[in-house]
Image (tube, rainbow, N blue to C red):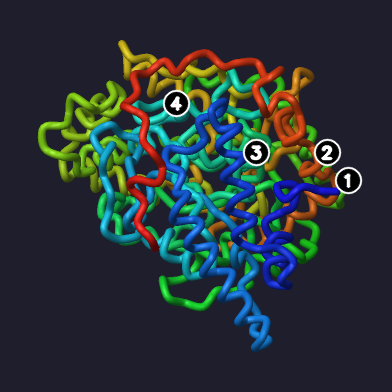
Amino acid sequence: MPETHDLTALEQGALVAAGDLSPVELVEHYLKRIDRIDRHLGAYVTVAAGTALAQARRREGQALAARRSATPLPPLFGVPVPVKDSVRTAGIRTTFGSAAFADHVPAEDDDAAALLAAAGTVLLGKTNTPEFELSGHTENRVAPPARTPWHPERSAGGSSGGSAAAVAAGLAPLAHGSDSAGSVRGPASACGLYGFKPSRGLVSAGPRPWDVSGLTTAGALSRTVRDAAALLDAMAGPPGSPPGGTFLAAAGQRPGRLRVGLVTRSTVPGAEVHPECRAAAEEAAELLTRLGHHVEPAELPAGASIARVFPPVWGVLAASRPVPEGSDDLLMPLTRHVRRQGREVSGVGFAEALQGFHAVDRAMDPLRERFDLLLTPTLAQPPQPVGALREEDDPGAEALRTVRNSPFTALYNVTGRPAASLPLHWTADGLPVGVMLAADRGADALLLAVSAQLEEAAPWNTRRPPLWSSAHPETDGGDLRQPPPAPLPLPPARSSGQRVARR
């Protein structure tokens, strides 16, 4: 008999619509799991228990009314969905992963949160993120580090590490993430999940004022491709638009025979691709070939290097982010370092770097003409130990470690193309290693279709980390390897109900 968290998000939504599962029961189930398990994982910064239960009661009444009037409900209606703590949520603490915002409670929602609410989801809480989303790990001064449930001494990646840890451990059925340089796909790889970054402009980034570059977009972290497609449907379009079904339908389509370029060497100097990561991509290439697609080796052109154009834009975005006056000392060394770099970029230099984004995109034209998809490792390394990427005394070295750990991902933020990480490989000692597929801008439906085809051929959803089952002694701390203490100073503990307003 499956437990509630064994169900996919779409299965939960279907049961809610039929009246066979209560949104309140769903929320209560996940709150209990979070209370018992999250102390090992650091998935959540704020658990919005009061808000979630109040929303769930309203969803229950709305679902009953819909059944009486034979009105169809959106696929994720009544399903709990946490939102990354980089997204403002009205009346609910939003820290951006920063001690400078430890007590920040916004007055309005960002569009991603508003769109999810309009689709009938229930806001379960805010998931962990590094300060201002600047790191390839999720280690900050407002919460414990986010850890992969497969090996809790290792990082869940960043910057959507909390979202990935929550879904992989069954602390949420799926989760919102955001991706500026690989922040959805890297954690998906580290946590054995499907992670989808859509094309630029598909999901509204409003009304946040600080990313004028188009690097950042909302994305989905899920256990199945169809769940991610449903979440993308919920977030696509302007606030107030009716939920559609374009991408969920696409996930059920069979793609034609595709041309796939296999790339295993990056253009980032010093980035060595681990043999397990290379093997993961090569195995995926073999699987695509068996499915009838044409796969051949490819190389990224020299002009596709983002080494010159990405850092100035990244720095300016960090420097232009507003922070409370007098709070610089609360910022982490990496944040201060990147902000200093950004302040040194001139207006002309920033404009030239943005123009360079277009040059990088044009440099990809020959590959676009040859291939429908590009296949690479998602990351250059398997999940790293907590603390391995951080270097408090040398933040420049920390930034370089992050870039070398994820040398393939940021290219698709620069070009605005959709990309997804698929959990098709595990190491002999049980570490997940993702592979990445990227398509042309606007070809999100194609990318979802081929992802679903791969999932059908090599199912991954039945593969669960040791702490998955609530009946397992590890969920009560019995046999679970205790992770080391949080290496960063934390603020006083907060009650999740004290700063939650009814939504």
Q: Nearer the viewer, residue 473 or 215?
A: 473
**Mark 2 touching mark 4, by CB under 8 A?**
no
Q: Amino acid at mark 1?
A: Arg
Q: CA distance from mark 2 to mark 1?
A: 6 Å
- Please name the amino acid that badge 3 sits on: Ala
Give the SS element for disc 3. helix
Q: Nearer the viewer, mark 4 or mark 1?
A: 4
Tag on residue 380?
none
> Residue 81: percent from the left, percent from the top?
55, 54
> Label 3: how many residues lie within 10 Å, few (<14), some (14-19) or many (20+)?
many
Answer few, some or many: residues within 10 Å of disc 1's Cα (few below 14, many 20 plus, some between 14 and 19). few
**Residue 403 at x, y percent in the picture:** 45, 27
Q: Earlier in the sequence, mark 4 or mark 1?
A: 4
Q: Are marks 1 and 3 in contact (CB under 8 Å)?
A: no
C-alpha distance separating marks 4 and 1 = 43 Å
* Farthest bottom residue in view: 69
Q: Earlier in the sequence, mark 1 or mark 3?
A: 3
Across the whole image, how many numbered discs are drawn on residues? 4
Residue 362 appears anywhere in the view: no
Q: CA distance from mark 2 to mark 4?
A: 39 Å
Give the amino acid type for the residue marked by disc 2 in the picture.
Answer: Glu
The residue labelled by disc 4 is 144
